[in-house]
Image (cartoon, helix red, strand yellow):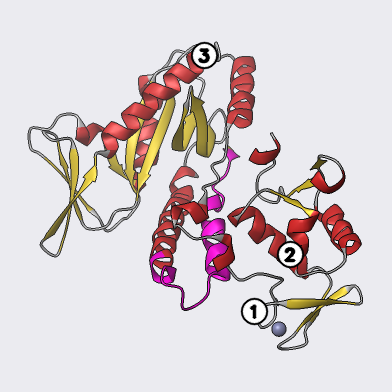
Amino acid sequence: MIVKSKTKPLLLHQLEALLNRIPDNHSKRRYIEEDYAKQRAGYKGEKSLEYHLSYLPEKDYYIFHDLRLSAGKHYFQIDILILTPFFISILEVKNISGSLYFNPVFTQLVRTIEDTEEGFPDPVKQVKRQAYHLKSWIEEQRFPVPPIEPLVVIGNERSVIKFHPRDKINPQLVIPSSEIPYKINYFINKYKTEAYSTRQLKKLITKLEISHTPLLTEILQRYQISPAELKQGVQCQKCFSFPMIRMHGRWICSACKHLSKDGHIQSLQDYSLLIDQSISNAQAKEYLGIESRDTVKRLLQSVSGKKEGVRRGTKYALDFFIDKPSSLH
Ligand SMILES: [Zn+2]
């Protein structure tokens, strides 16, 4: 069964919010659009793996997508983790098109498209490192460590996978996505000793769920964009222009006259993805373009479950996407 499903990554939400608020003629817009297209393709590729994963038995197979766990000072991320009482398999998904050659000597992935070669970091090395981190993590949680089988899955079905004729290792670890059920079946037959009792398995599932720490990228910093370069205010959901004006308890679009009661919600979501996961009354006043402090207070109280600080120092948590706002913890 799927414990943690493949959902739209935070980074995609962030890029969408950024593209929504960056002016059309901004010099970095095209670059961000390209990044967005790449990220989206990766997401779709991984989403399409769900079909192959659905062939795994329901009982005793627990699937987690996008787990990010702590390894001391750093984090490690696992695209897909398959937990069973007998073994664990971790899948690193690559959606790289073209002809892919796994060079065993230089541990590098070389992609060729129309006679142009391009090198990529070796995904086999990457997934082995994750297996190592996972092993340490399980030990730290004081659970027994079962056999861990790392795999690199090539999600793009039209990619051609090539190995060196004498390469004994990579062909065992790199598979096209359609091979997932067969490979897992192979592990099922290979490992017959139970590493976990039902009780332990349940405990470990909970531990994995609560230990997952989503990554919120400092997206403006990544592209060297300041908040002042973004479009401010509430966006009209009908004609998409900025800003809507607050009037008699509602928002009215200055371009198309569309009326909205909750236009500020999407704007505050954008704020949480791009700028900060908490906001003060003064910041919201300026960002939403509202004169009245009391109105802002009412709006913030209606969307935020948590606040911290007193009087003018009060900050409201904007936890639309993550329930652990970093600036409040
Ligand atoms: Zn409008």
Magenta highlight on residue 270 = no
In front of the other: label 3 or label 1? 1
Q: What residue type is labelled 2?
A: Glu
Residue 310: quarter of image: top right
Specify which label sits upstream in the sequence, 1 or 2.
Answer: 1
Is residue 314 visible to the viewer in this orientation of the structure?
no
The residue at the point 51 percent across, 14 percent down is 140
Is the CB–ligand 1 distance for label 1 below 8 Å?
Answer: yes
Quote the CA–CA distance across marks 3 and 2: 47 Å
Which span is picked out in magenta? 3-31
Q: Which of 253 and 111 is in front in this view?
A: 253
- Distance (Cα) linking label 3 and label 1: 50 Å
Instruction: Locate the C terminus and report the quarter of the image it occupies.
Output: top right
- For this view, does 50 lie left or right of residue 275? left
Compared to residue 194, the image places residue 176 above or below, namely below
Label 3: which secondary element: helix
Badge number at residue 286: 2
Check if mark 3's residue and mark 2's residue have beta carbons within 8 Å.
no
Relative height, residue 263 to residue 81 (above, below) = below
Kind of residue at badge 1: Phe
Secondary structure category for the residue under label 1: loop
Task: Please tell me which of labels 3 and 1 falls first in the chain.
Answer: 3
Q: Find disc 3 in the rendering and name its residue.
A: 140
Mark 3 or mark 2: which comes first in sequence?
3
Q: Do the residues labelled 1 and 2 touch (CB within 8 Å)?
A: no
How dense is the environment of label 1, judged by Cα within 10 Å: few (below 14), some, or many (20 and up)? some
Q: Which of marks 3 and 2 is in front?
A: 2
Q: In this view, does 102 lie to the left or right of 228?
A: left
Q: Which residue is drawn at 58% across and 39% down?
A: 4
- In space, the residues marked 1 and 2 are separated at their CA atoms by 20 Å
Residue 240 - label: 1
